[in-house]
Image (cartoon, coloured by chain):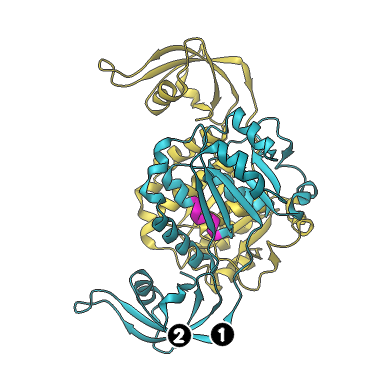
Chain colours: A cyan, B yellow
Amino acid sequence: MNLILLNKKEFDSNGIATLVGRRAQHICEVIKPAIGDRLKAGIIDGDIGEAEVIAIEPSDKANEQASVTLRIDSSTLSNSSPLAIDISLVIALPRPKVARRIIGLCTECGVKDIHFINSYRVEKSFWQSPLLSDDKVHQQVLLSLEQSKDTQLPRIHFHKRFKPFVEDQLPQIAKGKQALVAHPYNAKINIDSRADELADLKTQPRIIAVGPEGGFIPYEIELLQQAGFDTLGLGPRIYRVETVIPLLLGKLA
Amino acid sequence: MNLILLNKKEFDSNGIATLVGRRAQHICEVIKPAIGDRLKAGIIDGDIGEAEVIAIEPSDKANEQASVTLRIDSSTLSNSSPLAIDISLVIALPRPKVARRIIGLCTECGVKDIHFINSYRVEKSFWQSPLLSDDKVHQQVLLSLEQSKDTQLPRIHFHKRFKPFVEDQLPQIAKGKQALVAHPYNAKINIDSRADELADLKTQPRIIAVGPEGGFIPYEIELLQQAGFDTLGLGPRIYRVETVIPLLLGKLA
């Protein structure tokens, strides 16, 4: 936890918030501040500044849950979240554990729009997983924002039907963006191109689609192309989705 | 499994190998070839070519383990592994599950030299984990080579003592390479620099050191600098090690 993230609803009109649960426990056990210490804190979807520790109650026999009371110093608040990455992602839903890791790493890297979509090779059961409930996704997002010292929530969308999404919504979402789909065959652009060729890709916002294990099927690639996506080759290696996404963000951000 | 990896010892003088276990099961249940089909196969630390399926025994009631017999077609073999990445990594040992994932993703990306090292903030218990036994590491490496269609084993080293490694071995390992250590403070080079500035980093082999959660301590940074490492800033975000490594490989490979 490199930043303590607070919800605006958590503090009163004097800027005082009492935390229990995971954050309080982390503060007590890892940060171990003294009363009066100032910790780096941020407001979800808001500013970043300092919070003074005004009370600490570690968990002990008498006290099941640790609690920590902080006072946000509003004079220190400023809009200082790290810049977002100007890349939106469209990702064929991987198995839920992997999806959760991908939500985490994308959030850490500053991706603000992630669309998980269906595809012929996505297992139907993945859509039912409790790991992808709104609540679990939100928990993962908070952990990753705390990690990367960011307060700005990403928007994570789940689209259970491929064709209506790609035909009816995606052209609008991709409007004004360079749209690319990672695809090993007959790619129009290759990721191993010289840096100056890739530099052309960095002058505008991008939206990048990544297929499932085994890839998008030709029909899906066709529909994506009709929605304005160019194919992007990744070289001779075949990567797992959780490897290729940070690799692409490194190459293209 | 995008490539069936075979050990040279597995086949006889006619190029015939009978597989049981994980690979045979995968071939039977996922690839489902017919007799006579040709599969993409590679020899560990050797060439890539085609193998003809000459017998299949799926597992059933009578037959506990699936087995598949292949004949390597030596006329198809060629030295066609994807190119290695010219980046060596020095990584403060993370918790073993994460280390295993990192070994996987580095292997997938074509990194061929990985040095796990100790550091003040590495938990001692990590070094004892059975997940990091030679055998477990080798299994992970094979899975990742199969994934990325590569036959060339990476060299994975574990150095349990920081100072002797950094002082006595690292200068030799880093010789002739641009040596960088990821470090958030007072970095000499910044990863968010313009592409043409980073391009200078790509003209020679590189060796990149990545610290533990919480970072290398100042004394460790000093020793690394004495061993010839320049500090590399990653911008305002703080990444987990499993995120930052593929991100760096994307930026710098």
Q: Residues within 10 Å of mark 1 (few under 14, many from 20)?
A: few
Q: Residue at x 38, y 50 (%)?
A: A131
Quadrant in which residue B223 is drawn: bottom right
Q: Is residue B203 left or right of residue B93?
A: right
Q: Secondary structure at mark 2?
A: loop
In the picture of the structure, the residue carrying the numbered disc 2 is A15
Q: Are marks 2 and 1 on the same chain?
A: yes
Instruction: Name the residue type under label 1.
Output: Thr
Magenta stretch containing residue B74, yes or no? Answer: no
Seen from the viewer's position, the closer of residues B207 and B226 is B207
The answer for how far apart the CA atoms under marks 2 and 1 are is 12 Å
Seen from the viewer's position, the closer of residues B120 and A12 is A12
Which chain's residue wears label 1?
A
Which chain's residue wears label 2?
A
Question: How many numbered discs?
Answer: 2
Q: Is residue A63 above or below residue B154?
A: below
Q: Secondary structure at mark 1?
A: strand
Q: Give the mark nearer the N terminus: 2 vs 1.
A: 2
Q: Are marks 2 and 1 in contact (CB under 8 Å)?
A: no
Instruction: Name the residue type under label 2.
Output: Gly
Q: Is residue A90 left or right of residue B64?
A: right
Quadrant in which residue A164 is drawn: top right
Residue A50 percent across, percent down from the top left: 51, 82
Residue B42 percent across, percent down from the top left: 55, 26
In the image, which residues are magenta? A102-108
In the picture of the structure, the residue carrying the numbered disc 1 is A76
Label of residue A39 in the image: none
